[in-house]
Image (spheres, helix red, strand yellow):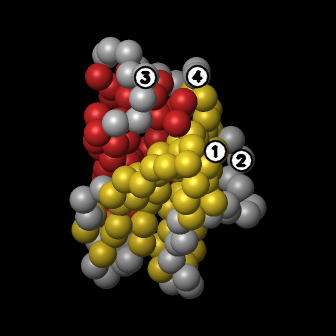
């Protein structure tokens, strides 16, 4: 299963259709970071025959750019609108990846997105999982999309 390709296609499609933005993928990271500063992270859990998670990690300025595009108005601080927009973004990307993986025989349901933000925090992912973390860049910033499925 090519998780990098699924993540890349899903993320690019959502950004093009929903945000009218180009999201350019980078090479999958060989090591993941679980420590974030001045960031916003949205997580969508997956449960069923397959278990996993999708997380989108954004520095605050990038989260503001994306939310401003979503809402079609300038957003200048991380508030409930930003949390809702980034949560919905994660939900859409996870849904697109789910469709791709369902075609490959991976069955699961998605949870409601959870959003974490702050000056400093850590996100631990599933142990014993297959996953990847891919960087993306947009006009106005960069972000990470991380996806893990339990083995």
Which secondary structure lies at badge 2?
loop
Image quarter of residue 3: bottom right
Q: Nearer the viewer, residue 80 or 149?
A: 80
Q: Nearer the viewer, mark 4 or mark 3?
A: 3
Q: Earlier in the sequence, mark 4 or mark 3?
A: 3
Q: Which mark is residue 27?
A: 2
Real-space CA distance between mark 1 and mark 4, rounded to the nearest whole angstrom: 14 Å
Residue 66 in view of the camera: no
Q: Which residue is mark 4?
A: 140
Which secondary structure lies at badge 3?
loop
Where's residue 120, x and y in %? 58, 54
Q: Which residue is mark 1?
A: 135
Q: Residues within 10 Å of mark 2 (few under 14, many from 20)?
A: few
- Residue at figure coordinates x 56%, y 64% from the top left: 122
Q: In the visual, does 64 lie left or right of 45? A: right
Up the image or down, 140 lies above or below 113; here it is above
Residue furthest front as drawn: 119
Image quarter of residue 133: bottom right
Real-space CA distance between mark 3 and mark 2, rounded to the nearest whole angstrom: 30 Å
Real-space CA distance between mark 4 and mark 3, rounded to the nearest whole angstrom: 14 Å
């Amino acid at each position: 299963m090519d998780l990098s390709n699924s993540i890349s296609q899903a993320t690019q499609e959502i950004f093009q259709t929903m945000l009218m933005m180009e999201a350019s993928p980078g090479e999958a990271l060989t090591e993941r970071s679980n420590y974030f500063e001045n960031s916003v992270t949205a997580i969508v859990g997956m449960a069923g025959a397959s278990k996993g998670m999708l997380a989108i990690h954004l520095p605050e300025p990038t989260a503001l750019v994306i939310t401003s595009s979503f809402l079609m108005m300038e957003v200048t601080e991380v508030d409930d609108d930003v949390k809702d927009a980034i949560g919905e973004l994660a939900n859409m990307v996870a849904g697109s990846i789910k469709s791709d993986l369902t075609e490959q025989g991976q069955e699961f349901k998605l949870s409601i997105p959870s959003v974490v933000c702050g000056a400093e925090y850590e996100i631990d992912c599933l142990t014993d999982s297959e996953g990847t973390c891919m960087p993306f860049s947009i006009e106005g910033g960069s972000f990470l999309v991380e996806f893990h499925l339990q083995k």
